[in-house]
Amino acid sequence: MKTVLIAVAALLAAALLGVAGSPPARAARTPAPARVPVPSELTSDDVSFTGYGGLTLHGSVVAPRKASGPLPGVVLVTGSGAGVPRDHLRTEAVEFARRGLAVLIYDKRTAGYTDFRRSYSELADDALGGVRALRARPGVDPAKVGLWGLSEGGWVAPLAASRSADVAFVIVVGGNAMPPIRQQLWNETSALGRAGASGSLLDHGKRNFARLGADAGLFAEAFFPAEDVLGRVRQPLLGVWGEHDLQTPPGDNPPLFARALRRGGNVHYTFRFFAGADHGAHTTPDGGVTRGEALAPGYADLVGSWVRDATSGKAPVADAPKPPRQEYRSVEVSPSPWWTSAWAQLAAFVLFVVAFAAYPLVALVRRVRGRTVRPVSRWAPRLLSGAGLAAAPGLLFYLFYLMAAGRTPDPGPVLAGRPLPWLALQGLAVAAVAAVAGTAVAWRRAAGAVPAGERVRLGLLVTAGAVFVPWAVYWGLLLP
């Protein structure tokens, strides 16, 4: 029986490493668009303006060639990524200009923007620089210039509007009224849900891994107070979501927007939902995984007519139809208390590696030196050492693998809602818990027969095992 238990633990570790060690499936990405030609009825002029910190940003203004009077204008704020080129939004610029708007698109900053560091405040100042440039342009009505924000821009545009009365309106596409960490967690867990996963991997493992990243400073703007910012927005707001949005919860966000705006006394908001559209309100051939080139039918017409109404004092009041069905709900994520913080996790991980690795290493050294010490148990300490040493690094490796896989993760074969690598980790955790109990009982029975050096070795091992139990519960390894 003892040999079988040790063999099972070894097989579980091998299964974990074999399945989780395969290369992650790549997330489908939005292809870099070819440069959209500007039709003859439109003009495109290059412009430069000053953003945060005096940085010079470069862009283009796309507008109707012939206009009967000053035009409403809109500055487009793109989604996440450093240095996103203006051409990523040229389709929107051309279609909005065809509806009678002067549209400014610009190359996003690279300075101060990385995977681990970004400032929505700085991006908002960049956007306001674009507003100033467009308001000063001949042929544009300075009282009718607003902001449009996509995805990350859906946090930036309202922040900019809350700072300046020069912004006449706000449009958000695939926007969030929740903190980025909640949105990102939903993005990842809903993708795993579509792959068949459920239970503690999603409810505990993924959520706590996101918190760990935020605690460690690896998730910039994780707890950005989106609702507080929206509560300071006084301009009319148009919210647009695609039915097949896989990055932003299209059902949870509209009520949060409405609540935040109403809390600040703003009832001039309009929400619209487009069937067959993705995160950016483009058409999609495969349920939101791949972005088509064309905008969703009726989307550009909506923007044109809504801007004309909003800038003429005719913004609709609380026009918010029921949002689309959302299969997976988003969950709130709070900052970690100190006992589960990144520092506490690091301390626990170091303890596990040192204690679980020290047990077999000491045995190896003794064997090389020709010394023998009768073990208190032949199976329990070895099982605890092996299972614990596999489970702790294996958990972090597997969760990182899933995070890196993006929108189309491959969690491995799924059995009853649990991917096999997760089942392997849970099996290792159960084995470790049984082994720490067995080690403690065997040590107590041996009591006075244990040499001092062996007591230190066992004490370190049992201490690590005792810490491992609540750690495994926290990460969901001992939960359904």
Image (cartoon, rainbow, N blue to C red):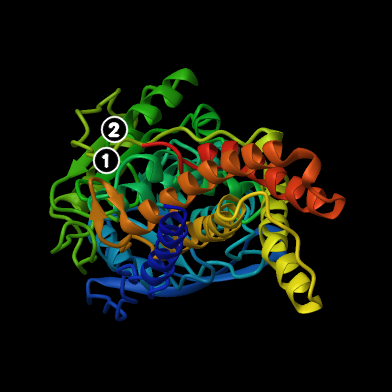
Q: Is residue 167 left or right of residue 480?
A: right
Cα separation between marks 1 and 2:
9 Å
| Residue 230: numbered disc | none
Q: Is residue 143 visible?
A: no
Amino acid type, label 1:
Trp
Q: Are marks 1 and 2 in contact (CB under 8 Å)?
A: yes
Amino acid type, label 2:
Thr
163 or 26, which is in the foreground?
26
Other-residue count near label 2 (Cα within 10 Å), few / some / many at <14 / 14–19 / ≥20: many
68 or 32, which is in the foreground?
32
Q: Is residue 255 visible?
A: yes
Query: Residue at coordinates 53% horizontally, 49% vertically from top-left?
Result: 209
Give the secondary structure at mark 2. strand
State the residue position of label 1.
Answer: 306
When asked about the image quadrant of residue 324, the answer is top left
Image spot of residue 405 (x, y percent): 39, 65
Give the secondary structure at mark 1. helix
Query: Residue at coordinates 62% horizontally, 52% vertically from top-left?
Result: 381
Image spot of residue 54 (x, y percent): 71, 64
Query: Residue at coordinates 38% horizontally, 62% vertically from top-left?
Result: 406
Other-residue count near label 1 (Cα within 10 Å), few / some / many at <14 / 14–19 / ≥20: many
202 or 32, which is in the foreground?
202
Circle 1 or circle 2, nearest the eye: 2
When asked about the image quadrant of residue 440, the answer is top right
Image spot of residue 304 (x, y percent): 25, 49
Q: Which circle's residue, 1 or 2, is located before the other in the chain?
A: 2
Q: Residue furthest right?
A: 452
Image spot of residue 72 (x, y percent): 36, 50
Looking at the rendering, in which quadrant would you find the C terminus?
Answer: top left
| Residue 270: numbered disc | 2
